[in-house]
Amino acid sequence: MDENNLNQYDGGGYNNGNRGGNQNNNGGKGPGGNGEDPKKQSIFLLLIASLITLFCMSYFMKTLTGNSEKEITYNEFIRMVENGEVESVQIESDRITIKPEKKVEGTVSIYGAPSVTYYTGRIADEGLTQRLLENNVDVKGVVPDGSGMIVSIILTYVVPMLFLWLILSLLFRRMAKGGGGMMGIGKSNAKVYVEKETGVSFKDVAGEDEAKESLQEVVDFLHNPGRYAKIGAKLPKGALLVGPPGTGKTLLAKAVAGEAHVPFFSLTGSDFIEMYVGVGASRVRDLFKEATKNAPCIVFIDEIDAIGRSRDSKFGGGNEEREQTLNQLLSEMDGFDTSKGVLILGATNRPEILDKALLRPGRFDRRIIVDKPDLKGRVEILKVHAKDVLMDDSVDLDAIALATSGAVGSDLANMINEAAINAVQKGRNYVCQQDLFEAVEQVLVGKEKKDRIMSKEERKIVSYHEVGHALLSALQKNSEPVQKITIVPRTMGALGYVMQVPEEEKYLNTKAELHDMLVGYLGGRAAEEIVFDTVTTGAANDIEKATNIAKNMVTRFGMSERFGLMGLATIENQYLGGGARLDCSDVTAADVDTEVMNILKGCYEEAKKLLSENRELMDKLAAHLIEKETITGKEFMKIYRKEKGIPEPEEDEEKGLEEKKGIEKKEEEKKPEKAEAKAEEEKKEEASGAGDMPGGENSNLWKEEDEMNRTAGQGGGPVGRFSNTSGNFEP
C-alpha cells in the first residue's frame, strides 16, 4: 500500500473528478490470409451477374412484348391478307411480322408503334409475294446483318452484365471488408504480423522482467524446438497474460511478434462475435486452420474474456453465440498438435470470469501475471519513455518513480509526455525535474485553475485544512514526509492538497501506520472545527478514504478487537480496482459499521488533541501558506523545526564532514612526503568541488526531506492517499 499520498480539499463533495504497430492485414492467400482467390472470386461474380442479367432481360422482353405481339397460324395470316386486314408485312429469315390495317380498340401505342402486331412462322410458299401485292400489302424484306446483331447482343446483354458485375463486386467487397473476401462473414479477420513488422521488441518493454522471461522461453522454443524435444519437453499450448489495464499486456504480445520471426496472428475477442449464431465458431475454425497451415506461429487473442466468459449464469452466461464460440475454441485448443509449433496467447484483466475449462492445463498452461511495476520497474519504464526526450542534468527519475507508486506503464508514459509539453510551453529546450513533478500533479489533480478566485475566508479555511494534514504528518512517528502544500485550485475539483512521498517503497503496512494514516486523513476536518468552530464540505474526499481504510482494517486485515481474525469481505475484480464485497449476515454488517464508526471517532479525537496542543504552530504555518499559496516540504519542515527547537540537519552533516576530513588527514600523515603532498592537492580540489555541487532545489529535495524527517524523529507513513488502501494509483 505504498503509493503517492495526496490529501485534497475538494471544496464540497459534489465535484466529480474525471479521470492506447504496424499492422499488415493480409487478406489474400499469403501467410495467414483468409481471403479467397481473386480469380475464382471474379469468375464467380461474373457467373452470378450473367444469370441475373439473362433472367432480367428475358423477363423484361417478355413483359414489353407480351401485350404488343401475338402469334397466329399461317392460315389466319392468309385469311387476313385476303380480307384486306393487313397493312404491311416484314419477311424475315424465320418469321413474318404482320402489321394489321386497323388498331384493336382499347389498345395503347408503345413508342409510336401499334400496340398489337402479329407474327407467324415462315413457310415455303412461292405464291405469297404475288398474293400480297395483289391485295395492296406493303412487303418489306430484311437483309441479315451480322454486325447489327452483335451490337444488339452487346447492348442488350453484355453491357448490363458487366455493369451488374461491377456493382456486385463493390457490394461484396464492402460486405466482406475485414471478413476475408466474398462471403467472408464466417472467416477470421486476424491481423498478421510477420518478422519484425510490429516495430516492438523486448528491449522496448521494461518493468515486467518475470513476464518477459516467461515469454522469452516461448520464443526460444519456437526458434530451437530441438533443444526441448531432445529432453522430452513440450511447447505450452497457451499462455494467458493477466494484469490491470495499462501494464503492457498488448505491448508484450507485440514484442513477442517482433522477436519470434514467425507469423503472428493478432485479434480481439470481440472479432469473433456477430449477430448471427454460428459465425464465431466458424471464425475460430478458420483461424486455427490458417494457423496450422503457417505453423510454427503465434495466435494472440486480446480481451479474451469477450468469448471466454464462464458459461455459468452468475457471470452472464446463456448467450448461445458466445457459448458456441467458446466451445469451438476449447475443441480447437484440444485438437491441434503442439509439435507443429502453434502457440495461443491470451490477454485479459478479468480472469475471475473466464470459464474454468479454458484455464485448465492443456489449454492455457501458463498464467503470466503482468502486474503494476515496483520501484525498480517504474524507474526502468521511465528510462524507456525518456530515452527520446531531451532532459537536463537536474532530472532524477528515481524521485519520480518514488512519487508515483502504483502507477502503470501507460501512466508513466503519459507523465513523460506531459512534462515535455510543459517544457515547450515554458520556452525551454530541455525537460527539468520541475516539469516532471508538475506532470505528476496534472495526472493526479489536474492543472492549476487560474481563473478561480476564492474569497479571503475560503482561502483561510482551505489553508488551515491542508496545514492540519501536514502538521499531523510531522507530529506522528509513522507518517510519510510532506513534499508540497498548496491552496491553488485544480481543474479536477481540488481547492488544495498536500502531497506526500514515501521514503522508500513499501509492500506492507502495520496497524500503527494505518492508525496514523487515519488520524492524518481526519486532520483537515479537525483543524476546521478547532479554528472555526464549524466544519465544511471540503473533507468529503478525506472521509471517504478514511472510511475505506477503517472498513478494510475490520473486514480484511483482522485489526479489529471485536471481530479479531474473521475475514468478512472479498475483493471483486482485483485487476480493475474493484472494491470489497461484504460476505456476512446483515446483523454482522451492522456491527461492522458500528466498529468502523468507533475507530474513526477515536482517530478524530486524537487528531483534534494533537492539533489543539500545537495551535500556535498551526497558526504560523497557515499564515505562511496563505501568503505563499504554495510551500515545499523543505519550507514546511524548516518552520516546524524552528518552532520545535530541532536543529537543522545541515549542522549534523557539517560535523560529519569535519570528522571525515580529520580521519583522512590522520591517514595521509602516515604516507610518504610525496604522497602526502599529492593527497593534500587532491584534498583541496575535492573540497572546492564539494562546494560547487549543492544542486538545485528540485534535484535534492527528496534527500533533504528524508534527512529532515529522520532528524525530527519521524518515520515514513502516509497521511492521506489519492486512492484506496489497495495501493492503486488512480489518476
Image (tube, rainbow, N blue to C red):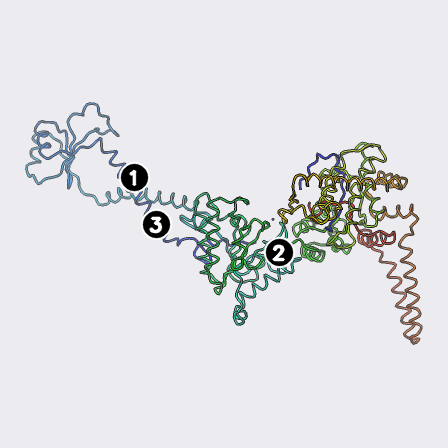
Amino acid type indicated by mark 3:
Phe
> How far across and how far down the image is residue 488, in percent?
78, 39
Marks 3, 2: nearer the viewer: 2
Which is more N-terminal, label 2 or label 3? Answer: 3
Q: Which residue is mark 2?
A: 369
Residue 174, image quadrant: top left
Measured Cα–Cα span from mark 3 to mark 1: 18 Å
Q: Position of residue 191 (x, y in %)?
A: 50, 53
Circle number at residue 44: 3
The residue labelled by disc 1 is: 56
Q: Quadrant of the C terminus?
A: top right
Q: CA distance from mark 3 to mark 2?
A: 49 Å
Q: Is residue 4 left or right of residue 277?
A: right
Q: Quadrant of residue 215?
A: bottom right
In this rendering, the label closer to the viewer, 1 or 2: 2
Q: Amino acid at mark 1?
A: Cys
Helix, strand or loop at label 1? It is helix
Q: Residue furthest left?
A: 127
> Is residue 115 left or right of 598 when viewed as pictured?
left
Q: Going from the N terminus, do you reach mark 3 or mark 1 first?
A: 3
